């Protein structure tokens, strides 16, 4: 069974940085796209960033995080990482790792990791 496990959330002051990691239980090449979504209290879950699991690794960012976040993947470690810099209080949310399987487009979610940006 495919599992996605996030790590790296926590409490950080405004302007600070956090690095989130998502480890897949198998090879990430079973996915055609992976990425991160977030859900703030009382709001719907929204896309943060995605990366295709292809040789080019096409990347897409939400406008709200462009220039502040970097998504990357480590094929050898089967991980996808989100580096978040210049964090703002409005970035506070539960961050979820997401993946879409190549074989049937089924979608998988991690359990979520809390990111809190507060002074």
Image: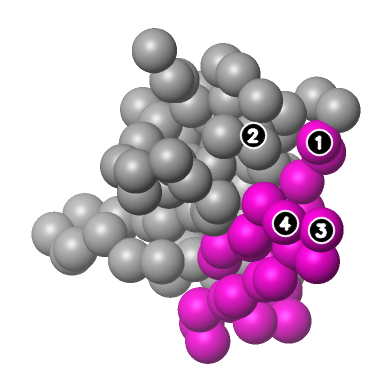
Q: Looking at the image, do the residues carrying marks 4 and 1 touch, with CB atoms under 8 Å apart?
A: no
Residue located farthest toward the bottom when viewing the structure as drawn: 63
Alpha carbon of mark 4 to alpha carbon of mark 1: how far?
A: 10 Å
Question: Judging from the image, what secondary structure is the residue with disc 4 in?
Answer: loop
Alpha carbon of mark 4 to alpha carbon of mark 3: how far?
A: 4 Å
Q: Which disc number belongs to residue 28?
A: 2
Question: Judging from the image, what secondary structure is the residue with disc 2 in?
Answer: helix
Question: How busy is the neighbourhood of tag 1: few (under 14 within 10 Å), some, or many (20 plus)?
Answer: few
Counting from the top left corner in percent of width and height, residue 58 is at 70, 71
Task: Look at mark 4 in the image and give the residue it sits on.
Answer: 54
Query: 90 left or right of 23?
Result: left
Q: Which disc number belongs to residue 75?
A: 1
Is 53 colored magenta in this rendering?
yes
| Nearer to us in this view, 90 or 69 | 69
Residue shown at 36% from the left, 27% from the top: 111
Alpha carbon of mark 3 to alpha carbon of mark 2: how far?
A: 13 Å
Residue shown at 43% from the left, 40% from the top: 103
Question: Judging from the image, what secondary structure is the residue with disc 1 in?
Answer: loop
Counting from the top left corner in percent of width and height, residue 101 is at 44, 41
| Magenta-colored span | 49-75
Q: Looking at the image, do the residues carrying marks 1 and 2 touch, with CB atoms under 8 Å apart?
A: yes
Task: Look at mark 3 in the image and give the residue it sits on.
Answer: 55
Residue 44 visible to an observer of this rendering: yes
Instruction: Choose mark 4 or mark 1, whichever is in front.
Output: 4
Residue shown at 56% from the left, 62% from the top: 50
Q: Quadrant of the C terminus?
A: bottom right
């Amino acid at each position: 069974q495919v599992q996605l496990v996030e790590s790296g959330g926590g409490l950080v002051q405004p302007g600070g940085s956090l690095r989130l990691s998502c480890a897949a239980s198998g090879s990430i090449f079973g996915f055609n796209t992976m990425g991160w979504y977030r859900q703030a209290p009382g709001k719907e879950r929204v896309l943060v960033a995605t990366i295709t699991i292809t040789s080019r690794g096409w990347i897409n960012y939400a406008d709200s995080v462009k220039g502040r976040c970097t998504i990357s993947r480590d094929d050898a470690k089967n991980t996808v990482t989100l580096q978040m810099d210049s964090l703002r209080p409005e970035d506070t949310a539960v961050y979820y790792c997401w993946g879409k399987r190549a074989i049937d487009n089924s979608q998988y979610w991690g359990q979520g990791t809390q990111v809190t940006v507060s002074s």
